[in-house]
Image (cartoon, coloured by chain):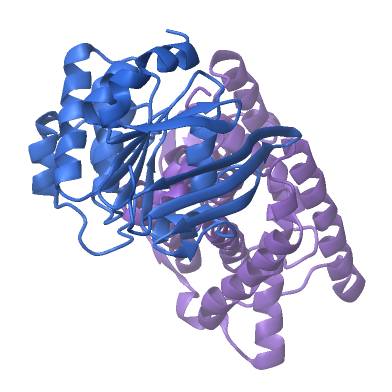
Protein backbone atom coordinates (compact mmCIF):
# COMPACT_ATOMS: atom_id res chain seq x y z
CA UNK A 1 0.00 0.00 0.00
CA UNK A 2 1.42 3.32 -1.05
CA UNK A 3 0.86 6.25 1.26
CA UNK A 4 2.04 9.64 0.09
CA UNK A 5 1.33 11.53 3.33
CA UNK A 6 4.22 11.88 5.72
CA UNK A 7 3.78 9.50 8.63
CA UNK A 8 2.65 10.69 12.08
CA UNK A 9 5.16 8.43 13.80
CA UNK A 10 8.24 7.26 12.01
CA UNK A 11 10.75 4.84 13.50
CA UNK A 12 14.05 4.39 11.67
CA UNK A 13 16.86 2.01 12.50
CA UNK A 14 15.89 1.98 16.17
CA UNK A 15 18.39 0.11 18.34
CA UNK A 16 18.19 -0.34 22.07
CA UNK A 17 19.98 -1.98 24.93
CA UNK A 18 19.18 -3.13 28.46
CA UNK A 19 22.54 -2.95 30.18
CA UNK A 20 24.78 -5.26 28.15
CA UNK A 21 22.08 -6.94 26.13
CA UNK A 22 21.30 -5.57 22.72
CA UNK A 23 17.52 -6.00 22.23
CA UNK A 24 16.51 -4.04 19.13
CA UNK A 25 18.73 -4.31 16.07
CA UNK A 26 17.47 -1.59 13.78
CA UNK A 27 13.66 -1.48 13.84
CA UNK A 28 11.99 0.65 11.15
CA UNK A 29 8.30 1.28 10.52
CA UNK A 30 5.77 4.08 10.02
CA UNK A 31 2.39 4.84 11.52
CA UNK A 32 0.08 7.27 9.74
CA UNK A 33 -2.49 9.59 11.21
CA UNK A 34 -5.66 7.71 12.21
CA UNK A 35 -4.27 4.22 11.62
CA UNK A 36 -4.31 1.20 13.89
CA UNK A 37 -1.00 -0.57 13.36
CA UNK A 38 -0.14 -3.83 15.06
CA UNK A 39 3.24 -5.24 15.95
CA UNK A 40 3.03 -9.01 15.94
CA UNK A 41 5.68 -11.49 16.98
CA UNK A 42 6.64 -14.16 19.43
CA UNK A 43 7.64 -13.59 23.03
CA UNK A 44 11.00 -11.87 23.16
CA UNK A 45 10.83 -10.58 19.58
CA UNK A 46 11.21 -7.01 20.86
CA UNK A 47 7.63 -5.70 20.61
CA UNK A 48 7.35 -4.32 24.14
CA UNK A 49 10.90 -2.98 23.96
CA UNK A 50 9.93 -1.13 20.78
CA UNK A 51 7.10 0.65 22.60
CA UNK A 52 9.36 1.39 25.55
CA UNK A 53 12.07 2.71 23.25
CA UNK A 54 9.60 5.06 21.54
CA UNK A 55 8.56 6.24 25.01
CA UNK A 56 12.16 6.66 26.15
CA UNK A 57 12.09 4.22 29.06
CA UNK A 58 14.85 1.81 28.06
CA UNK A 59 18.45 2.04 29.21
CA UNK A 60 20.00 3.20 25.98
CA UNK A 61 18.72 3.72 22.43
CA UNK A 62 19.83 5.05 19.08
CA UNK A 63 18.29 5.63 15.68
CA UNK A 64 15.43 7.97 14.91
CA UNK A 65 11.90 8.30 16.27
CA UNK A 66 10.05 11.22 14.68
CA UNK A 67 6.60 12.24 15.82
CA UNK A 68 4.75 15.04 13.99
CA UNK A 69 8.06 15.80 12.33
CA UNK A 70 9.86 16.21 15.67
CA UNK A 71 12.82 14.03 16.70
CA UNK A 72 12.19 12.30 20.03
CA UNK A 73 15.25 10.09 20.40
CA UNK A 74 17.14 12.41 22.76
CA UNK A 75 14.16 13.27 24.95
CA UNK A 76 13.37 11.99 28.45
CA UNK A 77 10.14 10.01 28.75
CA UNK A 78 8.25 12.86 30.43
CA UNK A 79 9.04 15.05 27.41
CA UNK A 80 7.94 12.30 24.99
CA UNK A 81 4.62 12.14 26.86
CA UNK A 82 4.27 15.92 26.60
CA UNK A 83 4.74 15.64 22.82
CA UNK A 84 1.44 13.76 22.76
CA UNK A 85 2.22 10.02 22.98
CA UNK A 86 0.64 7.92 25.73
CA UNK A 87 1.53 4.41 26.84
CA UNK A 88 -0.70 1.71 28.27
CA UNK A 89 1.89 -0.73 29.62
CA UNK A 90 1.71 -4.51 29.43
CA UNK A 91 1.52 -4.94 33.20
CA UNK A 92 -1.24 -2.27 33.17
CA UNK A 93 0.48 -0.22 35.85
CA UNK A 94 -2.51 0.39 38.12
CA UNK A 95 -1.28 1.95 41.37
CA UNK A 96 -2.17 0.11 44.57
CA UNK A 97 -1.74 3.16 46.79
CA UNK A 98 -4.20 5.20 44.70
CA UNK A 99 -7.98 4.92 44.57
CA UNK A 100 -9.67 4.10 41.27
CA UNK A 101 -10.53 7.76 40.80
CA UNK A 102 -6.98 8.88 41.58
CA UNK A 103 -5.65 6.31 39.10
CA UNK A 104 -8.01 7.64 36.45
CA UNK A 105 -7.08 11.26 37.11
CA UNK A 106 -3.34 10.67 37.51
CA UNK A 107 -1.84 11.35 34.05
CA UNK A 108 -1.67 15.11 33.56
CA UNK A 109 -3.22 16.77 30.52
CA UNK A 110 -0.50 17.12 27.88
CA UNK A 111 -2.59 18.65 25.09
CA UNK A 112 -6.01 20.22 24.71
CA UNK A 113 -8.78 18.02 23.42
CA UNK A 114 -8.61 14.91 25.61
CA UNK A 115 -11.81 12.92 26.06
CA UNK A 116 -14.17 14.16 28.75
CA UNK A 117 -14.99 11.92 31.68
CA UNK A 118 -18.53 11.51 30.34
CA UNK A 119 -17.22 10.18 27.02
CA UNK A 120 -14.84 7.86 28.86
CA UNK A 121 -17.67 6.48 30.98
CA UNK A 122 -19.70 5.89 27.83
CA UNK A 123 -16.82 3.75 26.56
CA UNK A 124 -16.33 2.00 29.90
CA UNK A 125 -19.63 1.98 31.84
CA UNK A 126 -18.24 -0.43 34.47
CA UNK A 127 -15.56 2.05 35.49
CA UNK A 128 -18.10 4.62 36.59
CA UNK A 129 -19.61 2.14 39.02
CA UNK A 130 -16.20 1.27 40.47
CA UNK A 131 -15.08 4.87 40.88
CA UNK A 132 -15.61 4.85 44.62
CA UNK A 133 -13.49 1.73 45.06
CA UNK A 134 -10.74 2.26 47.58
CA UNK A 135 -7.83 0.65 45.81
CA UNK A 136 -7.06 0.57 42.12
CA UNK A 137 -5.63 -2.93 42.31
CA UNK A 138 -8.81 -4.36 43.88
CA UNK A 139 -10.49 -4.19 40.46
CA UNK A 140 -10.73 -7.30 38.30
CA UNK A 141 -8.13 -7.80 35.57
CA UNK A 142 -10.52 -6.60 32.88
CA UNK A 143 -11.50 -3.51 34.84
CA UNK A 144 -7.85 -2.71 35.50
CA UNK A 145 -7.15 -2.95 31.77
CA UNK A 146 -10.02 -0.60 31.01
CA UNK A 147 -8.81 1.81 33.68
CA UNK A 148 -5.32 1.69 32.18
CA UNK A 149 -6.71 2.62 28.75
CA UNK A 150 -9.25 5.12 30.11
CA UNK A 151 -6.72 7.20 32.01
CA UNK A 152 -4.59 7.93 28.92
CA UNK A 153 -7.62 9.06 26.90
CA UNK A 154 -8.10 12.03 29.22
CA UNK A 155 -4.66 13.48 28.56
CA UNK A 156 -5.16 14.82 25.04
CA UNK A 157 -2.46 12.54 23.60
CA UNK A 158 -3.64 11.43 20.15
CA UNK A 159 -1.09 8.67 19.65
CA UNK A 160 -1.68 5.65 21.86
CA UNK A 161 0.77 2.80 22.44
CA UNK A 162 -1.17 -0.22 23.73
CA UNK A 163 0.89 -3.14 24.96
CA UNK A 164 -1.05 -6.43 24.84
CA UNK A 165 -4.34 -5.06 26.11
CA UNK A 166 -6.04 -8.45 25.84
CA UNK A 167 -3.49 -10.52 27.74
CA UNK A 168 -5.11 -12.86 30.24
CA UNK A 169 -8.63 -11.53 29.78
CA UNK A 170 -11.95 -13.30 29.19
CA UNK A 171 -13.34 -13.34 25.60
CA UNK A 172 -16.25 -11.06 26.42
CA UNK A 173 -13.86 -8.42 27.78
CA UNK A 174 -11.55 -8.83 24.78
CA UNK A 175 -14.56 -8.06 22.58
CA UNK A 176 -15.27 -4.93 24.58
CA UNK A 177 -11.68 -3.77 24.22
CA UNK A 178 -11.83 -4.45 20.47
CA UNK A 179 -14.96 -2.34 20.24
CA UNK A 180 -13.25 0.43 22.19
CA UNK A 181 -10.25 0.44 19.87
CA UNK A 182 -12.51 0.73 16.82
CA UNK A 183 -14.41 3.61 18.46
CA UNK A 184 -11.14 5.37 19.28
CA UNK A 185 -10.03 4.98 15.67
CA UNK A 186 -13.28 6.57 14.51
CA UNK A 187 -12.61 9.46 16.85
CA UNK A 188 -9.29 10.05 15.14
CA UNK A 189 -6.86 8.42 17.56
CA UNK A 190 -3.76 6.80 16.09
CA UNK A 191 -2.93 3.50 17.73
CA UNK A 192 0.16 1.33 17.79
CA UNK A 193 -0.84 -2.01 19.20
CA UNK A 194 1.39 -4.83 20.40
CA UNK A 195 -0.34 -8.20 20.32
CA UNK A 196 0.32 -11.91 20.58
CA UNK A 197 -3.36 -12.57 20.02
CA UNK A 198 -3.40 -12.51 16.24
CA UNK A 199 -7.11 -13.23 16.00
CA UNK A 200 -7.87 -10.15 18.09
CA UNK A 201 -5.41 -8.01 16.14
CA UNK A 202 -7.05 -8.98 12.86
CA UNK A 203 -10.35 -7.46 14.07
CA UNK A 204 -8.91 -4.01 14.66
CA UNK A 205 -5.69 -3.44 12.70
CA UNK A 206 -5.19 -1.64 9.37
CA UNK A 207 -1.64 -2.86 8.92
CA UNK A 208 0.71 -5.37 10.50
CA UNK A 209 4.41 -5.49 11.16
CA UNK A 210 5.86 -8.83 12.15
CA UNK A 211 8.87 -8.67 14.43
CA UNK A 212 11.56 -11.28 14.91
CA UNK A 213 14.83 -11.10 16.85
CA UNK A 214 14.65 -7.35 17.37
CA UNK A 215 13.91 -6.51 13.73
CA UNK A 216 10.85 -5.99 11.56
CA UNK A 217 10.73 -9.13 9.41
CA UNK A 218 7.60 -8.50 7.38
CA UNK A 219 4.81 -6.04 6.86
CA UNK A 220 1.49 -6.21 5.12
CA UNK A 221 -1.88 -4.49 4.98
CA UNK A 222 -5.16 -5.86 6.17
CA UNK A 223 -6.23 -6.69 2.61
CA UNK A 224 -3.20 -8.93 2.13
CA UNK A 225 -3.82 -10.82 5.32
CA UNK A 226 -5.27 -13.98 3.79
CA UNK A 227 -2.47 -14.25 1.26
CA UNK A 228 0.09 -14.06 4.05
CA UNK A 229 -1.64 -16.27 6.57
CA UNK A 230 0.63 -19.25 6.13
CA UNK A 231 3.79 -17.18 6.45
CA UNK A 232 2.35 -15.48 9.50
CA UNK A 233 1.64 -18.79 11.21
CA UNK A 234 5.23 -19.71 10.64
CA UNK A 235 6.49 -16.49 12.24
CA UNK A 236 4.18 -16.71 15.21
CA UNK A 237 4.54 -20.44 15.64
CA UNK A 238 0.81 -21.03 15.96
CA UNK B 1 -3.39 18.43 94.24
CA UNK B 2 -4.78 14.90 93.89
CA UNK B 3 -3.26 11.52 93.24
CA UNK B 4 -3.67 8.97 90.44
CA UNK B 5 -2.41 5.43 91.19
CA UNK B 6 -0.48 6.92 94.08
CA UNK B 7 1.25 9.47 91.82
CA UNK B 8 0.71 13.20 92.41
CA UNK B 9 -1.30 14.60 89.51
CA UNK B 10 1.18 17.41 88.84
CA UNK B 11 4.00 14.91 88.34
CA UNK B 12 1.84 12.76 86.09
CA UNK B 13 0.60 15.60 83.91
CA UNK B 14 4.04 17.20 83.93
CA UNK B 15 5.59 14.04 82.49
CA UNK B 16 2.69 13.63 80.10
CA UNK B 17 3.40 17.14 78.81
CA UNK B 18 7.10 16.41 78.41
CA UNK B 19 6.10 13.23 76.61
CA UNK B 20 3.89 15.20 74.24
CA UNK B 21 6.69 17.71 73.59
CA UNK B 22 9.17 14.94 72.82
CA UNK B 23 6.47 13.25 70.77
CA UNK B 24 6.04 16.45 68.74
CA UNK B 25 9.69 16.30 67.74
CA UNK B 26 9.62 12.53 67.16
CA UNK B 27 6.60 12.97 64.90
CA UNK B 28 8.06 15.86 62.87
CA UNK B 29 11.39 14.12 62.39
CA UNK B 30 10.07 10.65 61.66
CA UNK B 31 7.56 12.19 59.24
CA UNK B 32 10.43 13.75 57.28
CA UNK B 33 12.30 10.45 57.30
CA UNK B 34 9.19 8.59 56.13
CA UNK B 35 8.55 11.04 53.28
CA UNK B 36 12.18 10.83 52.15
CA UNK B 37 12.37 7.05 52.43
CA UNK B 38 9.11 6.61 50.55
CA UNK B 39 10.19 8.69 47.59
CA UNK B 40 13.98 8.33 47.45
CA UNK B 41 14.50 4.92 49.03
CA UNK B 42 17.24 6.57 51.07
CA UNK B 43 17.56 6.22 54.83
CA UNK B 44 18.43 9.81 55.57
CA UNK B 45 20.81 9.52 58.52
CA UNK B 46 21.70 13.20 58.01
CA UNK B 47 18.23 14.08 59.30
CA UNK B 48 19.60 14.75 62.78
CA UNK B 49 22.32 17.03 61.42
CA UNK B 50 19.74 18.89 59.33
CA UNK B 51 17.61 19.32 62.46
CA UNK B 52 20.68 20.74 64.21
CA UNK B 53 21.33 22.99 61.21
CA UNK B 54 17.81 24.39 61.61
CA UNK B 55 18.53 25.34 65.22
CA UNK B 56 21.92 26.82 64.28
CA UNK B 57 20.35 28.74 61.39
CA UNK B 58 17.87 30.27 63.84
CA UNK B 59 20.73 31.18 66.19
CA UNK B 60 22.83 32.71 63.42
CA UNK B 61 19.92 34.56 61.85
CA UNK B 62 19.20 36.15 65.21
CA UNK B 63 22.80 37.06 65.99
CA UNK B 64 23.99 38.06 62.53
CA UNK B 65 20.92 39.60 60.95
CA UNK B 66 18.67 40.26 63.94
CA UNK B 67 15.91 38.10 62.44
CA UNK B 68 13.82 36.81 65.34
CA UNK B 69 12.12 33.51 66.10
CA UNK B 70 9.07 33.89 63.86
CA UNK B 71 11.16 34.92 60.86
CA UNK B 72 13.59 32.09 61.53
CA UNK B 73 10.72 29.61 61.64
CA UNK B 74 10.19 30.35 57.93
CA UNK B 75 13.66 31.32 56.69
CA UNK B 76 15.73 28.61 58.43
CA UNK B 77 13.77 25.66 56.91
CA UNK B 78 14.05 27.28 53.46
CA UNK B 79 17.83 27.73 53.79
CA UNK B 80 18.40 24.22 55.12
CA UNK B 81 15.97 22.84 52.51
CA UNK B 82 18.07 24.44 49.77
CA UNK B 83 21.14 22.82 51.33
CA UNK B 84 19.26 19.51 51.13
CA UNK B 85 18.47 20.07 47.46
CA UNK B 86 22.16 20.67 46.74
CA UNK B 87 23.07 17.47 48.60
CA UNK B 88 20.47 15.51 46.61
CA UNK B 89 21.59 16.87 43.23
CA UNK B 90 25.31 16.48 43.91
CA UNK B 91 25.45 13.26 45.92
CA UNK B 92 22.28 11.31 46.67
CA UNK B 93 20.94 11.10 43.10
CA UNK B 94 23.78 8.75 42.16
CA UNK B 95 22.80 6.20 44.81
CA UNK B 96 19.14 5.44 44.03
CA UNK B 97 19.91 2.30 42.06
CA UNK B 98 22.19 0.91 44.78
CA UNK B 99 21.44 -0.83 48.05
CA UNK B 100 19.98 1.21 50.97
CA UNK B 101 23.27 0.79 52.76
CA UNK B 102 25.06 3.23 50.43
CA UNK B 103 22.59 6.02 51.16
CA UNK B 104 22.85 5.31 54.87
CA UNK B 105 26.65 5.44 54.78
CA UNK B 106 26.75 8.60 52.69
CA UNK B 107 24.29 10.45 54.93
CA UNK B 108 26.10 9.17 58.02
CA UNK B 109 29.32 10.64 56.60
CA UNK B 110 27.48 13.93 56.07
CA UNK B 111 26.49 13.92 59.76
CA UNK B 112 30.13 13.61 60.80
CA UNK B 113 31.15 16.48 58.52
CA UNK B 114 28.30 18.82 59.46
CA UNK B 115 28.62 18.16 63.19
CA UNK B 116 32.40 18.50 62.96
CA UNK B 117 32.14 21.87 61.25
CA UNK B 118 29.64 23.11 63.84
CA UNK B 119 31.82 21.89 66.72
CA UNK B 120 34.88 23.52 65.19
CA UNK B 121 33.25 26.95 65.13
CA UNK B 122 30.95 26.87 68.14
CA UNK B 123 32.33 24.19 70.48
CA UNK B 124 30.12 21.54 71.99
CA UNK B 125 28.93 23.38 75.09
CA UNK B 126 25.78 24.67 73.46
CA UNK B 127 24.44 28.13 72.71
CA UNK B 128 21.45 29.86 74.29
CA UNK B 129 18.42 30.87 72.23
CA UNK B 130 15.80 32.96 73.96
CA UNK B 131 12.16 32.19 73.72
CA UNK B 132 10.11 34.73 71.75
CA UNK B 133 8.49 37.19 74.15
CA UNK B 134 5.00 36.50 72.90
CA UNK B 135 5.28 32.87 74.02
CA UNK B 136 6.83 33.40 77.45
CA UNK B 137 4.82 32.66 80.55
CA UNK B 138 2.14 30.04 80.85
CA UNK B 139 -1.34 29.04 81.90
CA UNK B 140 -2.40 27.52 85.18
CA UNK B 141 -4.88 24.84 84.20
CA UNK B 142 -5.73 23.97 87.81
CA UNK B 143 -4.29 20.45 87.68
CA UNK B 144 -1.00 21.59 86.14
CA UNK B 145 0.98 24.55 84.83
CA UNK B 146 1.20 24.72 81.02
CA UNK B 147 4.03 26.89 79.63
CA UNK B 148 2.85 28.77 76.54
CA UNK B 149 5.85 27.81 74.44
CA UNK B 150 5.30 24.09 75.03
CA UNK B 151 1.66 24.39 74.07
CA UNK B 152 2.75 26.16 70.89
CA UNK B 153 5.23 23.40 70.02
CA UNK B 154 2.55 20.74 70.32
CA UNK B 155 0.00 22.68 68.28
CA UNK B 156 2.51 23.71 65.59
CA UNK B 157 3.90 20.20 65.23
CA UNK B 158 0.45 18.66 65.04
CA UNK B 159 -0.63 21.22 62.44
CA UNK B 160 2.42 20.72 60.23
CA UNK B 161 2.15 16.92 60.51
CA UNK B 162 -1.54 16.83 59.62
CA UNK B 163 -1.08 19.33 56.77
CA UNK B 164 1.68 17.13 55.34
CA UNK B 165 -0.51 14.06 55.69
CA UNK B 166 -3.36 15.87 53.93
CA UNK B 167 -1.20 16.95 51.01
CA UNK B 168 0.22 13.47 50.49
CA UNK B 169 -2.94 11.42 51.00
CA UNK B 170 -5.68 13.69 49.71
CA UNK B 171 -4.39 15.97 46.94
CA UNK B 172 -3.39 15.54 43.33
CA UNK B 173 0.24 16.39 44.07
CA UNK B 174 0.14 13.70 46.75
CA UNK B 175 -1.26 11.21 44.22
CA UNK B 176 1.77 11.92 41.99
CA UNK B 177 4.06 11.31 44.95
CA UNK B 178 2.39 8.06 45.97
CA UNK B 179 2.29 6.81 42.38
CA UNK B 180 5.95 7.73 41.83
CA UNK B 181 6.87 5.84 44.99
CA UNK B 182 5.32 2.72 43.43
CA UNK B 183 6.40 3.05 39.81
CA UNK B 184 8.52 6.12 38.99
CA UNK B 185 9.17 5.00 35.41
CA UNK B 186 5.50 4.88 34.48
CA UNK B 187 4.66 8.15 36.25
CA UNK B 188 7.44 9.80 34.29
CA UNK B 189 6.12 8.29 31.06
CA UNK B 190 2.81 10.06 31.80
CA UNK B 191 4.65 13.36 31.44
CA UNK B 192 5.56 14.14 35.05
CA UNK B 193 9.09 15.32 35.80
CA UNK B 194 9.83 12.68 38.44
CA UNK B 195 13.51 13.56 39.07
CA UNK B 196 12.48 17.14 39.89
CA UNK B 197 9.77 15.82 42.20
CA UNK B 198 12.30 13.63 44.00
CA UNK B 199 14.65 16.57 44.50
CA UNK B 200 11.88 18.77 45.89
CA UNK B 201 10.65 15.96 48.16
CA UNK B 202 14.10 15.65 49.70
CA UNK B 203 14.25 19.43 50.12
CA UNK B 204 10.87 19.36 51.84
CA UNK B 205 11.81 16.50 54.18
CA UNK B 206 15.01 18.31 55.13
CA UNK B 207 13.07 21.54 55.67
CA UNK B 208 10.77 19.66 58.06
CA UNK B 209 13.81 18.63 60.10
CA UNK B 210 15.05 22.23 60.15
CA UNK B 211 11.60 23.43 61.22
CA UNK B 212 11.76 21.02 64.16
CA UNK B 213 15.25 22.33 64.88
CA UNK B 214 14.06 25.95 65.09
CA UNK B 215 11.24 24.94 67.41
CA UNK B 216 13.69 23.02 69.57
CA UNK B 217 16.15 25.91 69.87
CA UNK B 218 14.44 27.71 72.80
CA UNK B 219 13.81 24.43 74.70
CA UNK B 220 17.00 22.45 74.25
CA UNK B 221 20.47 23.85 73.94
CA UNK B 222 21.59 24.72 70.42
CA UNK B 223 24.56 22.39 70.16
CA UNK B 224 26.28 20.36 67.42
CA UNK B 225 25.22 17.02 68.90
CA UNK B 226 21.60 17.98 69.69
CA UNK B 227 20.39 15.87 66.77
CA UNK B 228 22.49 12.77 67.33
CA UNK B 229 20.95 12.15 70.73
CA UNK B 230 17.52 12.20 69.11
CA UNK B 231 18.11 10.33 65.87
CA UNK B 232 18.32 6.83 67.30
CA UNK B 233 14.97 7.19 69.03
CA UNK B 234 13.49 8.70 65.87
CA UNK B 235 14.70 5.74 63.81
CA UNK B 236 13.07 3.43 66.34
CA UNK B 237 9.86 5.42 65.90
CA UNK B 238 10.04 5.00 62.12
CA UNK B 239 10.61 1.26 62.46
CA UNK B 240 7.68 0.90 64.87
CA UNK B 241 5.38 3.01 62.68
CA UNK B 242 6.39 1.25 59.48
CA UNK B 243 8.90 2.50 56.92
CA UNK B 244 7.36 4.99 54.54
CA UNK B 245 3.96 5.26 56.24
CA UNK B 246 2.96 8.90 56.75
CA UNK B 247 0.17 8.51 59.30
CA UNK B 248 2.20 5.78 60.98
CA UNK B 249 5.08 8.19 61.57
CA UNK B 250 2.80 10.85 63.06
CA UNK B 251 0.77 8.58 65.34
CA UNK B 252 3.77 6.58 66.57
CA UNK B 253 5.77 9.77 67.09
CA UNK B 254 3.23 11.29 69.45
CA UNK B 255 2.25 7.93 70.94
CA UNK B 256 5.78 6.91 71.85
CA UNK B 257 6.51 10.34 73.30
CA UNK B 258 3.57 9.83 75.65
CA UNK B 259 4.56 6.24 76.47
CA UNK B 260 8.06 7.46 77.30
CA UNK B 261 6.67 10.22 79.53
CA UNK B 262 4.38 7.82 81.40
CA UNK B 263 7.22 5.34 81.88
CA UNK B 264 9.18 8.13 83.56
CA UNK B 265 6.38 8.41 86.11
CA UNK B 266 5.63 4.77 86.80
CA UNK B 267 8.94 3.05 86.18
CA UNK B 268 11.68 5.67 85.69
CA UNK B 269 14.44 3.08 85.29
CA UNK B 270 12.94 1.90 82.00
CA UNK B 271 12.21 5.30 80.49
CA UNK B 272 15.31 5.31 78.27
CA UNK B 273 14.78 1.82 76.96
CA UNK B 274 11.00 1.50 76.69
CA UNK B 275 10.92 2.63 73.05
CA UNK B 276 13.47 0.01 72.06
CA UNK B 277 11.59 -2.70 73.94
CA UNK B 278 8.47 -1.73 72.00
CA UNK B 279 10.49 -1.76 68.80
CA UNK B 280 11.71 -5.30 69.52
CA UNK B 281 8.16 -6.50 70.22
CA UNK B 282 6.76 -4.83 67.08
CA UNK B 283 9.51 -6.34 64.95
CA UNK B 284 8.65 -9.78 66.32
CA UNK B 285 4.91 -9.48 65.87
CA UNK B 286 4.57 -7.17 62.82
CA UNK B 287 7.89 -6.87 61.00
CA UNK B 288 6.48 -4.30 58.56
CA UNK B 289 5.63 -1.94 61.44
CA UNK B 290 2.29 -0.99 62.99
CA UNK B 291 1.13 0.96 59.94
CA UNK B 292 3.43 -0.48 57.28
CA UNK B 293 2.26 -2.33 54.21
CA UNK B 294 3.82 -5.67 53.58
CA UNK B 295 6.21 -5.46 50.65
Name which quarter of the figure residue A83 lies in: bottom left
Spot occupied by residue B30 in the image (x, y as percentages of width and height): 57, 46
Q: Please, which residue is most extreme toward the top here? A: A238
Tell me which residue sits at (50%, 22%) in the image.
B294
**Where residue B256 sits: x, y (%)?**
54, 37
Residue A231 location, x and y as percent? Answer: 44, 16
Q: Nearer the viewer, residue B2 or B41?
A: B41
Q: Where on the picture, by quarter, is residue B218? A: bottom right
Q: Is residue B233 above or below residue B217?
A: above
Q: What color does chain B have in the rendering?
A: purple
Residue placed furthest toward the bottom: B65
Residue B173 in sight here: yes
Relative height, residue B83 to residue A121 (above, below)? below
Res. A40 image quadrant:
top left
Say which chain is blue. A
Please indicate whether residue B5 sits to the left or right of residue A193 in the image: right
The answer to whether residue B54 is above or below residue A38 is below
For the point 52% across and 18% down, which residue is it?
A: A43
User: Residue drawn 26% across and 56% down?
Assistant: A156
Amino acid sequence: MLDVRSPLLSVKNLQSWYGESHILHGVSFDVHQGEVVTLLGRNGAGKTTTLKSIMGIVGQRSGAVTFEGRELIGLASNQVARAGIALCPEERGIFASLTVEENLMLPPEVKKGGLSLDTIFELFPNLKERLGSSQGTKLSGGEQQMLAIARILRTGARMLLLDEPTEGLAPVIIQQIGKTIRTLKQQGFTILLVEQNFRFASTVADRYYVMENGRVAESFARADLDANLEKLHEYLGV
Amino acid sequence: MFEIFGIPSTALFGQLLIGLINGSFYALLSLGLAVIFGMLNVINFAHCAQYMMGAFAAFLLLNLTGLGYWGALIVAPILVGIFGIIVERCLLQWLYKLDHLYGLLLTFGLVLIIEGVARNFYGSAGLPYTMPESLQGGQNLGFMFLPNYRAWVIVASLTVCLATWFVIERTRLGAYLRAATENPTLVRAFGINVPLMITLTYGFGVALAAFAGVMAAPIYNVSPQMGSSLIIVVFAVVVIGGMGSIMGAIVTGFGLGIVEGLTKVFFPEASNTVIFVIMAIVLLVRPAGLFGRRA
